[in-house]
Amino acid sequence: MRNIVLFSGGTACRTINIALSRRQVHLTRIVPAWDSGGSSKAIREKLGILSIGDIRQALMTMAHGEGRSGDIVRICNTRLSANRSVEETSAEFEYYAEGRHPLLERMEAGLRGAILNYLKTFSTTVGKGFDFRNGSIGNFILTGACIAHNGDVNTAIFVFRKLCGIAGNVWPCSLDSDLILSATLKNGNRLAPQDVITKMSDKDAEIGIRAIELTRKQGLTPSANPAALEAVERADLIAFGPGSFYTSVLPHLLVDGVLAAVERASCPKVFIGNILQCRETLGMSLGDVVSAFGDTWRAGDVETSPSLQVLGNRLLFPFEKTVGIFPYLADDLPKDGAHVTMLDELEDAWNRGQHEGDLVADRLLAIASADEAARND
């Protein structure tokens, strides 16, 4: 069974994740540990732990792809009300934490007890007055498991996977809880943290990003999660993307140990280009994005330039076209000519601007097969 490793964010590679989970592969998702927004922001600020939102999203995607749609997955996918008062939403949380939800009532006693224990642990730790609005029950369970296991995120993920019956792995790129992502624009202005970059103004998006930086408090170096490095070491194929380029894909290379591990891995490395531009890449083409990836790679403590197979979406029209407010990513070739670029029609026919998961999964497995055949010749 092939080991496939995907470096991306929480949602952009969802269709690819699902498609791979339905094939005979062992899939590992490596997700950001520097997310500073969303419903998990309140948890991170209250408890000082790394953001678990992307982890939970990736685990739920893995569960869906593996056909795990039982009661526990439904509970973990539940989100509390966003438009009620703090007091009302706290009472809504208690409805779950006390086991009164019908899905919890009908669960096997041991499973139900574990979930309620983690919810109680979370509730006790955050104390009264916590803002549960728009919060994910899955985030609360996963955080409760982390607290119950002495802050060990990897153990919490392992337990969460067992509760949900998930076979694939999801690991944060780093276990550091104080990571701060910042971006320097082409005019020298600086944006931080991650959620500020993601929500940059139209004016800043037009200026564009020149560079990003991943830092820790007190000048410490961001360090890689050993579980993520082990997955890279065993990989038969490593893919970067799709996802928000400057906040979900590129920062992985800035975590100490990741770049060296990827370079050492004797397997194909694939860069999956986005279908559309976004605020972070406005005005950029596929070639521009891959060149920026290569520049960051070469700036790291490695001995070689990246040898990437670039998988990009072929455009079928000779004029600019948009989905919503964002244009398609132009399908030009990387300017350094150091990569093998494969253009194909990868857009989902029913969801414009998104990848057709099965098509991309087939291309990735074909690359892995070709590499295996070449090794055996």
Image (cartoon, grey):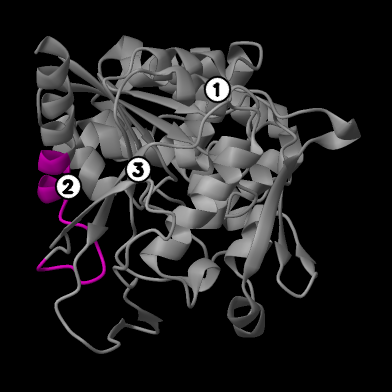
Find the magenta span and give its range: 349-363
Task: List the single residue furthest toward the front.
Answer: 337
**Residue 77 badge:** 3
Image coords of residue 374 (percent x, y):
14, 20
Q: Quadrant of the C terminus?
A: top left
Residue 153 lies, with reference to residue 324, above or below; the image says above
- Percent of width and height locating residue 255: 63, 31
Residue beneath disc 1: 260
Toward the bottom, the furthest residue is 319
Looking at marks 1 and 2 on the same chain, the residue that comes earlier in the sequence is marked by 1
Vertical comparison of 338 with 282: above or below = above
Residue at x 53% of width, y 55% of height:
292
Kind of residue indicated by mark 1: Ala
Label 2 vs label 3: CA separation? 26 Å
Depth check, mark 2 against mark 3: the one in front is 2
Q: Dot 1, how many residues are within 10 Å of its Cα: few (below 14), some (14-19), or many (20+)?
A: some
Amino acid residing under circle 2: Val
